[in-house]
Image (cartoon, rainbow, N blue to C red):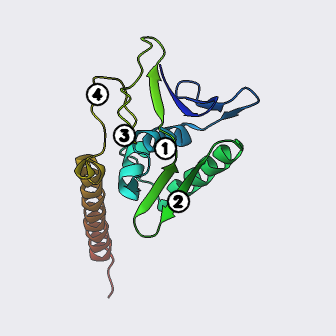
């Protein structure tokens, strides 16, 4: 089970989908949980909208409004913790950045592993996993989105051909004399 320490006494629990402190606990939806995990793995880095959508929704095609709403919900949840110093900032025509002064410490409760304290701003999944700071990884488009788009285009063309064939057949059966 992975948890993140977001600030003094504030924990983000991936399994329970919660952000909690001694005073309160805020439940997150599954989409907001995945977004916050992505932000914690890449603090203070601009994440493009395509990466975020692909990470959170996978092969499901959603509008940009879905991402905007999930970001809005996450901002509201984070704002309930007055001693948490962070901000999700919109970068027009690019994406979002999770501005965070502290390091998101990720630890594995089952193994009690803490990340290496090298002073970087990148969260680690465990000591053996490399950081996610390479921009080529952040902006790489998954192949499954291309497959879905190609499938939708093929389906549209096929349905247009069927519709044309049916229309031609019906018109051929009608006697206009």
Mark toward the viewer: 3 or 1: 3
Where residue 168 sits: x, y (%)?
27, 73
Marks 3/1: CA–CA distance: 21 Å
167 to 27, vertically: above or below:
below
- Say few, some or many: other residues with alpha carbon within 10 Å of mark 2 (under 14 / 14 to 19 / 20 or more): some
Direction from residue 35 to residue 175 in the image, left or right = left
Residue 152 in which image quadrant: bottom left
Residue closer to the observer: 80 or 166: 80
Q: Which mark is residue 129?
A: 4
Q: Regarding mark 4 in the picture, which secondary structure is present there?
A: loop
Q: Is there CB contact under 8 Å for labels 3 and 1?
A: no
Q: Earlier in the sequence, mark 2 or mark 4?
A: 2
Q: Is residue 151 above or below residue 128?
A: below
Q: CA distance from mark 4 to mark 1?
A: 20 Å
Q: Earlier in the sequence, mark 2 or mark 1?
A: 1
Q: Position of residue 121 (x, y in %)?
A: 40, 42
Whole-number angstrom distance, CA of label 2 to CA of label 4: 27 Å
Between circles 3 and 4, the one closer to the viewer is: 3
Q: Residues within 10 Å of mark 1 (few under 14, many from 20)?
A: many
Q: Which residue is mark 2?
A: 89
Q: How many residues crowd around disc 4 within 10 Å: few (fewer than 14), some, or many (20 or more)?
A: few
Foreground mark, 4 or 1?
4
Q: Which residue is the site of mark 1?
A: 35
Q: Which residue is mark 3?
A: 120
Say which label, 4 or 1, has the lower sequence index.
1
Q: Give the percent coordinates (x, y) of residue 46.
A: 40, 56
Frontmost of labels 3 and 2 is 3
């Amino acid at each position: 089970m992975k948890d993140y320490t977001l600030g003094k006494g504030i924990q983000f629990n991936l399994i329970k989908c919660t952000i909690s402190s001694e005073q309160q606990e805020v439940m997150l939806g599954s989409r907001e949980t995945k977004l916050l995990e992505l932000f914690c793995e890449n603090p203070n880095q601009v994440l493009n909208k395509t990466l975020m959508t692909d990470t959170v929704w996978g092969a499901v095609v959603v509008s940009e409004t879905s991402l905007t709403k999930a970001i809005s919900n996450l901002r509201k949840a984070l704002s309930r913790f007055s001693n948490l110093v962070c901000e999700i900032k919109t970068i027009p025509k690019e994406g979002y950045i999770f501005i965070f002064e502290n390091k998101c410490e990720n630890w594995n409760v089952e193994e009690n592993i803490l990340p290496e304290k090298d002073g970087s701003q990148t969260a680690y999944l465990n000591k053996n996993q490399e950081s996610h700071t390479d921009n080529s990884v952040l902006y790489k488009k998954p192949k499954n989105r291309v497959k879905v788009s190609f499938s939708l285009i093929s389906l549209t063309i096929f349905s247009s051909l069927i519709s044309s064939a049916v229309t031609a057949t019906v018109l051929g059966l009608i006697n206009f004399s």
